Amino acid sequence: MAPNAVDSTSAGSAKNPARAGPAPPPGRTQPITTVEDGEDDDEMEDEDDDDRNPLHDEPDEVLAGTILQLCKEPNEMVAHVVADEMMTRLRELRQRAVEKVVKHEVKRAVEEIRNEMQEPAAALRVALPGVNAFPDEKVRVEVATLRYIEKMTSIPVPHVYHWGTADENPWALLASIMLELSKLEMPKIGSLQCQGDDFVIGSHPLTMDMNELVKSGGIPSSVLPPEAATYSASQEWYEALADMHVAHLTFQRNNAIESADDCRDKFVARHLFRQAVRQGKLLSQGEGPEERKKEKEQEGAGKETFRLWVDDLRPHNMLVDADLNIVGVIDWEWAYFAPAQFAYDPPYWLLLERPEFWRDTVLEWRDEFSRVLDIFCRALRRVEEERDSKQLRTSAMPVSERMRESWKSGKFWESYAARRCYGFDPVFWEFPDERFFGKNTEGGYEGRMNLLSDKVRRRMELFVDRKVEESKEKIEEWDPEEARLCLGEVLSDLS
């Protein structure tokens, strides 16, 4: 979303349909041509206006009769010889005409394709912060001028489809959805089931990560939380997530590691994260003392509640109308009630891409996200103030403040690492590692060997040897019972 005033324009408009679109990007295959190497382009161009060749559709007999009339030779035999000769020539001409007509049609089709490729392309223009002293006014003037020039002249200018100021961006709509979800509570962690007209937590949290582990990683479902398992405390679910990280590394045999040292990095990261979880470090809040005191009182009274969390909630799954109003939110299959902290973490999709898939590094994603998060939290705060005025506040501490605190304290990265098996490693080593265990001067597992007991070190080397051997052959699946026993042995040594 735009951090300041924006306008959405097109390279062409209905008033000027002939404007060329953007050139194909470098390296992109260019449209094919119909002229072979060494063939004269003029030959084809001569045929551009010949939609019909008069010789093309005439039967051979008619052509022969025409020749006989034109020859007017006194000797009939000679006339027939001339006719045969000309007939052969005309057949050649007709074949050439057919070929040219075909080439003409192909060329016309290619031109149509080119025109389709050059249809107006939309672009989003943003008044950059720090560069424009009057961003809102600048956009208002530019939009008015563009529309004036388009209406009053034939000058080719972009057509403006939508525009708005910084205060009119659609993030307020997204913020309203986040607030609506944050007020939904259940007494357990898990997935919903219908029970008559009521809704209950009836099964384990069915997460997107669990699906990816089984379908993409080949992880046996027998080592994941049982379907009937639900959780009454955040600590229980965090421990289950940490165990799933270990299961991921243990059972993904194909393309799980790049080298022995890479395996050590991944083993130590999962062991340390699991250790931090079991010590309750993911439960520490970065909030004010009064807020935390109230939450502790509720937890002590057995009143910990959980919020609805949707793994796949993002703009990609939101339908909008022509005025950018959200008219539908789809894809709710990976929804479950989770620790409240998940609902209070900033949504990663503000940058539309996950940290581990960012075009640069996770650190650069963090820097970009910091700038965008401030804009979103301001929009969220405006929605909260409107709700406060209507006495609709849903928590003692505004969600906008909780999100800022989650980002500032590093809680965001802890929750993200807990939820994302496939994005775990780059996130853990950049953020939770130092937050939990202090400065890692050597980086990676080498800087954390002092934290490993002798038993864990022995288990690590046995684990590495096995993974290296497994990486030499492709194995499709594990026996369910064998998998449970194997994971139990690994987790026992890590305890």
Image (spheres, rainbow, N blue to C red):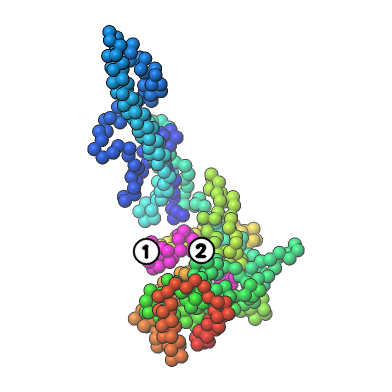
Q: Which residue corresponds to the image point at 70% horizontal and 68% vertical from the top-left?
A: 200
Q: Which residue corresponds to the image point at 55% horizontal and 60% vertical from the top-left?
A: 313
Image-based side of 198 in relation to 451, left or right: right
Going by the numbered disc 2, the residue's amino acid type is Pro
**Dividing the picture into quarters, in which one does residue 208 lie?**
bottom right
Read off the residue under disc 1.
360
* Figure check: 57 above or below 472: above
Which residue is outermost to the top?
74
Q: Which residue corresponds to the image point at 40% horizontal and 39% vertical from the top-left?
A: 113
* Figure check: 336 above or below 138: below
Going by the numbered disc 1, the residue's amino acid type is Asp
Where residue 305 appears, as percent x and y from the top left, is 64, 72
Image-based side of 366 in relation to 329, left or right: left
Of 46 and 96, nearer the camera is 96
Q: Is residue 276 visible?
A: no
Which residue is outermost to the bottom?
454
Instruction: Please state the extent of the stretch shown in magenta in the rendering.
Output: 337-365
Where residue 100 appears, as percent x and y from the top left, is 34, 30
Secondary structure of the residue carrying tag 2 is loop
Of 122 and 136, nearer the camera is 122
Of 59 and 267, nearer the camera is 59
Read off the residue under disc 2.
347
